[in-house]
Image (cartoon, rainbow, N blue to C red):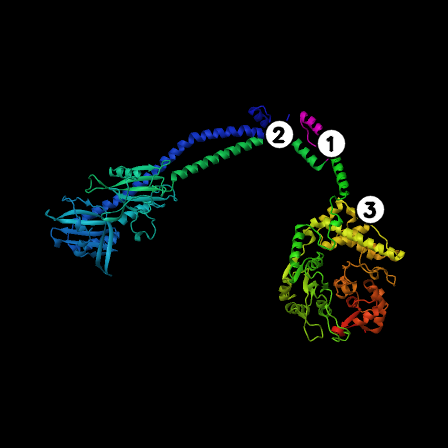
Amino acid sequence: MRLHRTLPQGNSLEFATFFMNRGMANRMLMLGLPILALVLLIIFSATGSSIEGILDRAIARNAHLQSQAMRLAVEQVLEETRNQLLILAAGSMDQSDMTNRLRFRAKAGGLRYRELAFEGLTPDKRYLLVNSDGEVVNVPMRQALASPTGPFHGIAAEHRIGHVSVAQPVEVTYSMVPVKSGNQNISLQVLRFATPVQDADGVFLGYLMLSLDLRELRDIISAYSAPNAPIAASGSDVRVRTLFFDRDGWMLFQSEAPDSGLAQRSLATDAVRAGFTGAFGRPGFNAAFRPDPENINYWNMVSDVQEGKPGQIALAENTSLWSNSQMRVERVSYVPVSFSPISQEDSIVLGGLAVLDTSFTTTRTGVQLMGIYIGAFVGGMLLLGLSLWWLARQTSRSVNAITEELEHRNTIGEDGNLDLPQLPRELERLKVGINALLERLRHAAEARRLRAAEDNALAQREPVPDLPHPEDLPVNGLIGTSPAMLALCDNVRKASQVMADVLVVGETGTGKELVSEAIHRLSARGTGPFITINCGALDENLLMDTLFGHVKGAFTEARAPRKGAFLTAQGGTLMLDEVGNAAPKVQQALLRALSTRRIRPLGSDEDVPFDTRIIAATNASLIDDSQRGTFREDLYYRLAVITINTPPLRDRKSDIPSLTVYFLSEALKAKARLKAEASSAAAAQPAAMSVAMPQISQGAMTKLMDYDWPGNVRELKNTLTRALTFCEGGILFAEDIQLGHAIQGQGEIILNENSPAAPVQESRNQQNPPCEQDFCSAPPAEGGTRTNGMPARVPDRQPDRQPDRPADQAADMAGSGDDSEFAMQGQQADSPARQGDQLQGLGAAEKLNRRIMDAWPTIAAAGSISRQEYQSLAGKDISMRTAQYDLQLLVQQGLVRKEGRGPAQRYVVVGK
């Protein structure tokens, strides 16, 4: 029985429960891997310490061998110097002979031997020769005696023939020595050797001195300290420093990098004495340094060297091996440097060599060894783990086959039995039980899914709770409580407090005109007029006349003066909608008017001041248009004193419930008002009507919230109006909401109705007003049937009306007349020039309204017509804007063409 929880009886039971809940492979791994790990740890612990000790001794022996090799090389140079001095002492002491001998050795050995001095029994029997850059120079006796460390101040040797004495290393400077290039100072750091001289008869003649350049010894230990030395400590990456010190503990010089500049470097001890405190400057050797007595390791090393003992100092835990740990040293190997005054006799200790291992070879080797141990441990664990896993997999293959088949059947939802090869008897019984259990679980899951689907469908048809009440929403204000709308309302409030011009930017249908009206209503000009001009719906001349007006007689048809929108909105607000579509000439006139706050009507010679606030609106990026050259940049900065962006509906979907309630209530009010007017006209008395707003289902609200609304609030309003039309009960369901392509498909069905359906539609139109059928605001002239029997044209979208404005003012200002919305729709010409009765045959009549169809025979007979003549012909007191639209529609259909400009413009029938 499988246990799924830890038993509470104790630790042993908890471990047993955990072990029982593991698979077969996990159990084998849990038993085998700890045993292997324990065995490997025992082996590594037993062998690790011994291997580490062996490696440490080998590294120490190698370091000691390196220091011994350095000592032998240095002592060999010292013995060679002794032999060279004895050879010179056996010859003639004549100065010229000595000069030739020293010059010969300078050519052979370079700068190894720097001084050769002879001090006879009388002052005139002494001289000093110096090897200066390969040139043998005779130093005048005055300069030689003037140097306090000169050779004649300290030559002292035994009188035994063949005995060579060695002095302490010294620094000497000879001033103003004449050389080939002139007089110069010669500075040397040398080790001097001296021996007595006798003639052939055994008569003592004096002392002969030969000095060895200490840089020669420095170059030797530098070569042996380099990574590519003949005997290196361990590998090419080892970093070794070697120090030469005298028997008194004075640090004299250190090894340097054996590069091309080594010969020019002076002796130094700055690297090896880092962190030490002590005394600088031994008498006769200013560059020497001796540490203070508290550096116990250093002075123990010096003591062993004085006794002629080599040794090593290893790094110990929590101690400083060298100085104060400023220079990190793992091991110090030291050896004494000895010299034999006479061959085959006891030697004396001149000083010592200390080899400092700063590469931590032992530590790095230990880390590498630990890495090998870890690799071996991980490899062994991995190999054994794979072996145990393979064994467990082979053992549990039959069980896994049942498990995998069961998971596969549950995934794909098959109802058949498990299709497996022959299994052992116990597993066959298990398979039968599993098949029965799977079938029961499958039936139970199906029942749960059906219940959940049913519950969800019922929930989607339930009304949305907590919707706002229509009376709680503003009547003519901005609706919404989303952050975007709250920010917009705050910007509107701020903009209304100042009189600066405003630019409202937003997509089509986001309520730019409502924002403009709100700014006007809240401002100090709220009692003044608010006029809207659609700059994209008028051509250049008509827009200029609409904005700036004209005086009487400005052109042929100007029988009366016209004030224009700027002066008509005096004391109020003028909204310029779609200002980005204005022609360049209009843009220039607007820029001048906004700059000077004065306009000049057409035909006038005087500028007229105006007191009107300008609010411009656009759905395009004017700054981008200005960069492309389609909009004046200076006009943009004149308009954009204050810029307000209207958010698209997709960015404030939390406002959709409030907007839905508002638009539904407004549509119902309009429907009730139309029915009341119809009833009042029929009964000659008003009839009060109350229409209840339908509820909104959860599915309908979800559908509204999930849509992106490319047409923004205007599309939402039209969608809800259409949904209310098709709603037959007291609640709007999701199927009543038609979005996107569903609307276009329905529109095509309406436009392509067959002729038998037309009389039915005509009869309906005769019985009920069009506004009662689809809650539109278009006049009956656009919604009924035509006299020629063709069905009425279904507009692509309905124009927005301002019910609080006079109809003639709205039409005259070209913002919201009967056909103002259709002026922005570009239509393609269907055919070449056609006239008279050919309209219906060519299909052009389907795109023309009733006014044009009634006036067309007269226009075709006359051959041409002006806008004023068309206004008189159409009658019904149509506005100039509506006449302009009708004539433009004829031009788009290829029936007429425009000739002339301005007031003298005429529309000529094509073919006349």
The image quadrant where one finds the N terminus is top right
State how many labels appear: 3
Seen from the viewer's position, the closer of residues 60 and 296 is 296
Q: Is residue 20 magenta?
A: no
**Viewer-nearest of labels 1 and 3?**
3
Disc 2 element: loop
As drawn, the label of residue 439 is: 1
Q: Quadrant of residue 135?
A: bottom left
Q: CA distance from mark 1 to mark 2?
A: 26 Å
Q: CA distance from mark 2 to mark 3?
A: 65 Å
In the rendering, at what x and y percent does residue 55 appear? 38, 35
In the rendering, at what x and y percent does residue 722 appear? 79, 52
Disc 3 element: loop
Badge 1: few (under 14), some or many (20 or more) residues near its Cα, within 10 Å? some
Residue type of the residue flagged with mark 2: Ser
**What residue is shown at x 24% (from left), y 57% (from top)?**
185
Residue type of the residue flagged with mark 1: Glu
In the rendering, at what x and y percent does residue 434 appear? 70, 29
Q: Are marks 1 and 2 in contact (CB under 8 Å)?
A: no
731 left or right of 163 in image: right
Badge 3: few (under 14), some or many (20 or more) residues near its Cα, within 10 Å? few
883 over 445 or under it: above or below: below
As drawn, the label of residue 729 is: 3
Residue behind mark 2: 396
Residue type of the residue flagged with mark 3: Gly
Q: Is residue 419 magenta?
A: yes
In the rendering, at what x and y percent does residue 515 appear? 69, 57
The image quadrant where one finds the C terminus is bottom right
12 left or right of 893 in image: left
**Residue interval drawn in magenta:** 414-439
